[in-house]
Amino acid sequence: MRHKQAKIATDHVAFEAFYRRHVDAITLFLARRVDDPHTVADLVAEVFMAVLDSAHTYQPGRAPELAWLYGVARNTLASERRRAFKESRLTNRVGGRRTLDTDDLARLEERIDAERTARKVFKAMADLRERDRAVLELVAVDQLTIAEAAAALGIRPGTAKVRLHRARQKLQALPLVMEGTPG
């Protein structure tokens, strides 16, 4: 499987199959966290560009490819947030966006609308420590197992369990956060 992942970096047919297999999951992952369709489209492209650069790092024994891909997406999103923070708001709104046709824009707006509740949960989770929130997001929102979330974050499953428990204790009143999280 390691060879298969490395192959996506050099074989356009293998990369296209990988992309088609995961583009919807990555788009939804980002739409839960970002409310601008142009930014979502750009980030999806950046995630798959990052995959080309880091395919050799995937270790199939550690996690399924989607968990690894969520880790790549989290890193890409974090980089984007750091970059956006450094730029002025005007520069961020005017520059660096690819043009979306009407159909692309409509599809992304539908996905963003569908993930509105998840974005509200993310806002409610803002008071959590980042490392606790990261595990909770991956398990409760993105539906990864604790082991997969740990792999995506590069931590041990036991550490992920502790962080998830701590986050759940602080957010017991949020039903969406509690659904889908193992006891």
Image (cartoon, rainbow, N blue to C red):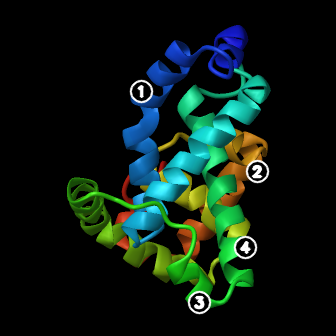
Relative to the observer, which residue lies in front, 11 or 61? 11
User: Tag 4 or tag 2, which sits nearer the N-term?
Assistant: 4
Q: CA distance from mark 1 to mark 3?
A: 35 Å
The amino acid at mark 1 is Arg
User: Tag 3 or tag 1, which sits nearer the N-term?
Assistant: 1
Residue to which mark 4 is pinned: 82
For the N terminus, give its image quadrant. Answer: top right
State the SS at label 1. Answer: helix
Contact flag, marks 1 and 3 (Cβ < 8 Å): no
Q: CA distance from mark 1 to mark 4?
A: 29 Å
Image coords of residue 74 (percent x, y): 63, 54
Residue to which mark 1 is pinned: 21
The amino acid at mark 3 is Arg
Q: CA distance from mark 3 to mark 2?
A: 37 Å
Q: Nearer the viewer, mark 3 or mark 2?
A: 3
Image coords of residue 51 (percent x, y): 65, 35
